[in-house]
Amino acid sequence: MAETLQQLILDSLDAQSIIDDTRSLTIPGQATPATSQEDQITILGALNSLLSREMIVYETHETLSHVLTPEGSQIVELGSHEARVWAALPAKGEGSPLTPVQLKKQVGDETAKVGQGRAFKNGWIGKEGDGFVQIVPTIQDATRVDLREIASAGTSKAGEKVLADLRKRKLIIQRKGQWFTVKKGPYFSTSTAKPETDLTVEMLTAGTWKTSTFKKYNFDAEGAPSDGGALHPLLKVREEIRNIFLEMGFAEMPTSSFVESGFWCFDALFVPQQHPARDLQDTFYLSDPKEALPPEPEYYKRVSTVHEHGGFGSTGYRAPWSHEESSKLLLRTHTTASSAHMLYKLAAKCRGENVEGDAEEFAHGSSTTGDGPDDGFRPAKLFSIDRVFRNETMDATHLAEFHQVEGVVADRNLTLADLIGFMRVFFKKMGIEKVRFKPAYNPYTEPSLEIFAFHPMLDRWVEVGNSGMFRPEMLEPMGFPKDVRVHGWGLSLERPTMIR
């Protein structure tokens, strides 16, 4: 039927040049003009098909009409509620009045309820004793008349006031309609043959491509949406934490070196060479190659000396220093190894060395915060989020690989209160309001704090991180002035995600 209807539209345009009103068309297979909204929707489908081939153009005209509800259709057939109540009652003085109960039995509960009030209002019925009677000999059922007119014409000559009253009584509903004015398009033809969509080998061989009509390509059309994946929950929280750090003015540290030496992972942090964390059962050591390249000799000497003999106000560990232990290659157990690298670079100017781009890369170009002469120190805020590795027995709560969120803040005369205040602000931005701290021990921070957050589902406090202030035995061998303090903290990415 679609092609027949399209042909009808094209033939009508060929004969008349314009179709002023598509309601005048008669759809093939029907006997009357297409005045209903359903017919116009059918015509619209044919128009859009012809429009896509630029054979026609059309204008849309909107109309508002009314249709009867089931109750309105019942009134057209049987009369209004008030008219049926009037008809059921005897005329005054010609019979026994009907009581309300008798009236309900005769016309039904709904008709009696609605019609009784409206019949009284119209002055059609009156009360006599305990019942009702007719008080006028004849009536004009205006509601029925109006609804008949609306059923045939879609509106009422009586105006909007009558229509609004009938809508309020839920006897009619308003319906939007449309009809169309159609004109010839730039590629008008009376042929409904569909244009070719592909140039085939057969067309080229036979030469039919010369006389064929091809469909235009729509280069603005969007392709079919692909089924894309979704970010892993850990990646979502990782990006959120990263944005929090950047919002607070931190610079991101490079953390691409998964393999570190024992020197940078432990010794530079003032972790004793006899510490249990360096045992085989806690750390993954490389078998090939086994040894790392040596660090800068003078720095290596200062670090080994403070471990073995003390210095910078410390007695050290008073234990033999092992070059073999320091040069072992391993999978980093924490990203603090990367922090040690960055702090050593940050202290370069304090040592009298010049590292190109150092101030801009690590300290955002900040100036010295001291009161005296410039000693080369620049405050810095650094962070990283990356993987670390532990030689753990895997179970429900432990993995051999997890993510660590690491941060350091370096400035003069920082205090533990500054660290606690920062951690409260940081976790609040993550949506974790309840945070508390407990004194702890770390080899490379003093004082040290464990960080706990309240888990609402478990209804208990869960450890989410560790923090503290880096020891002078770690900072001063790097070359930092004595009044420089560095906050350091680390937390897993998984546990805050679990609490969220």
Image: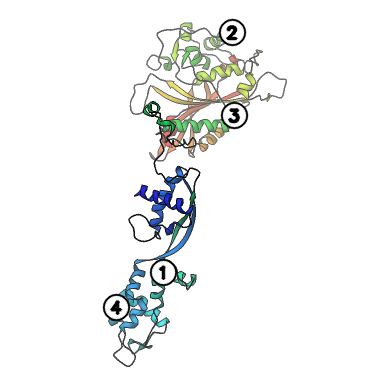
Image quarter (top left, top right, bottom left or bottom right) of the C terminus? top left
Q: Give the amino acid type for the residue marked by disc 3 in the picture.
A: Thr
Colour mapping: rainbow
Q: Residues within 10 Å of mark 4 (few under 14, many from 20)?
A: some
- The answer to which image quadrant residue 131 occupies is bottom left
Note whether 131 is above or below 294 in the view shown.
Answer: below
Disc on the earlier residue, 1 or 2: 1
Q: In 3D space, how far apart are the residues under numbered discs 2 and 4 (Cα atoms)?
A: 110 Å
Q: Nearer the viewer, residue 60 or 116?
A: 60
Q: Residues within 10 Å of mark 2 (few under 14, many from 20)?
A: few
Q: Nearer the viewer, residue 177 or 212?
A: 212
Disc on the earlier residue, 2 or 4: 4
Return the x and y of residue 195 as percentages of the image width and height: 41, 38
Q: Which residue is mark 2?
A: 298
Q: Which residue is mark 3?
A: 415
Note whether 111 is above or below 465 in the view shown.
Answer: below
Q: In 3D space, how far apart are the residues under numbered discs 3 and 2 (Cα atoms)?
A: 30 Å
Q: Nearer the viewer, mark 1 or mark 2?
A: 1
Kindly identify the residue that appears in the image at 41 percent across and 84 percent down.
123
Magenta segment boundaries in residue numbering: 251-255
Q: In 3D space, how far apart are the residues under numbered discs 1 and 3 (Cα atoms)?
A: 84 Å
Q: Which residue is mark 1?
A: 150
Return the x and y of residue 172 as percentages of the image width and height: 40, 67
Q: Which residue is mark 4?
A: 107
Residue 267 in sight in this render: yes
Q: In 3D space, how far apart are the residues under numbered discs 1 and 2 (Cα atoms)?
A: 101 Å
Q: Give the amino acid type for the residue marked by disc 2 in the picture.
A: Glu
Return the x and y of residue 20 as percentages of the image width and height: 48, 57
